[in-house]
Image (spheres, helix red, strand yellow):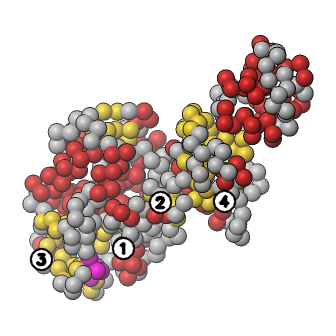
Amino acid sequence: MDYDVIVVGGGSAGLMAAVAAGEGGARVLLVDKGDKLGRKLGISGGGRCNVTNNKEFDDLIKWIPGNGRFLYSALSQFGSRDIIAFFEGLGIALKEEDNGRMFPVSDRAKTVVDALVGRVRSLGVEVRINTPVERILYTGGQVAGVRLKGGKEVSASCVIAAVGGKSVPKTGSTGDGYPWAEAAGHTITKLFPTEVPITSGAAFIQSKELQGLSLRDIELTVWNAKGKKLVTHAGDMLFTHFGLSGPAALRCSQYVVKELDKQAGGGTVRVTVDLMPDRSADDVYRETLNLTAADPKKAIKNVLKTAVPEKLIPLLLVRAELDEMLTHDNIPKAKWTELAKLIKAFPIPVNGTLSIEDAFVTGGGVHLKEVDPHSMESKFTAGLYFCGELLDIHGYTGGYNITAAFSTGHAAGSSAAARAAELRA
């Protein structure tokens, strides 16, 4: 054998797999088709690199809605606390920000990437960039190595596939690993975009009258066709020329995708924005009416500017059938009740999302029932391991996906090194 372990893909999962395999005493080759390692890691967290999330174990799992429970074993071996200790051990000082997000004190992703790549090299891992893999080689129900583009074959007793999904293709994630997995008998669950902006054909979106409007501390809710609430996410939101973006919209996007999938095509999904989530509809009614009473000669369109975003006022008043020039003494109470309801649940029909290539995260991937949750080894092919976004696992933004990548990568690398050692013995 040329190597004990070949890691294909030099992203978060692949780099951590190479570290774990190297620390396990394996002869490791790390190959990546790009010209540098850690490309997606280098742009994560807005270029600051959100290395993990410091939430408690069970809470962390909840923020990985795409099969997070599969990660119990991997996170028990190498979880967020271990990730923090790992980077601090490399001399990277970390800081905790809102909602448990952990960043380097330097606020530079390059600090993290350089430290991780430096650790890989210090362990004697051979690194080859600009080295695309054509396919993984199998023989007799186990891994034999890889064939590189150009035809050269490199042998190994273990291969770790860590080439990511199909999101952010400029970083090298172009779906290369799916056919490799299928060649070993694996099922690829349906791929879909997650953590992605939402699109809408609503007239007020298409007219761009709300473009650029940023809403702070709102709640966004997705409803199914029967009027049942699917999910609500709190946070900030941005109206764009095509629909909705911002943290709350990104977190709701996967539910929009799944609900649209249930329809025959060409349908819409209703989402609603609660502009005042900390108040009831009765509170909104009373407080806004009191504002008009305090300035009874002023038109309601001007009074409402202190309560709701100015760009939204015309839409709210039209839908509530209120004349914008009304003053306090002429306000019809039933229609003001309707205005309060709209402030609590402003409806937006949405018709989809941007593409999977435009998404931050890929939903779907290698079917988890076909992968050992402790080792990340294929249940079909000995010596074949999967980790990171190639697996059917996806979390919200905020350090959850990178935690899953580091955790599964570490499990795969450790397990592959142990298997290689057994075969050498």
Q: Is residue 69 left or right of residue 18?
A: right
Give the residue at x 14% y 52%: 118
The quarter of the rendered structure image containing the N terminus is bottom left
The quarter of the rendered structure image containing the C terminus is bottom left
Contact check, label 2 and label 1, Cβ < 8 Å: no
- The mark that comes first in sequence, 4 or 2, is 4
Give the residue at x 71% y 70%: 264
Q: Position of residue 334 (x, y in %)?
A: 89, 31
- On whether residue 328 falls in the magenta region, the answer is no
Looking at the rendering, the stretch of residues picked out in magenta corresponds to 133-137
Real-space CA distance between mark 4 and mark 3, rounded to the nearest whole angstrom: 51 Å
Residue, disc 4: 351
Residue 56's place in the image compared with 148, above or below, is above
Residue, disc 1: 176
Name which residue type carries label 4.
Asn
The residue tagged with tag 4: helix, strand or loop? loop
Name which residue type carries label 3.
Asp
- Pointer 2 local density, CA inside 10 Å: few below 14, some 14–19, many at least 20: some
Which of the 4 image quarters holds residue 143? bottom left
Q: Position of residue 414 (x, y in %)?
A: 23, 59
The residue tagged with tag 2: helix, strand or loop? helix
Which of 272/372 is in front? 272
Tell me the tag on residue 358.
2
Name which residue type carries label 1.
Asp
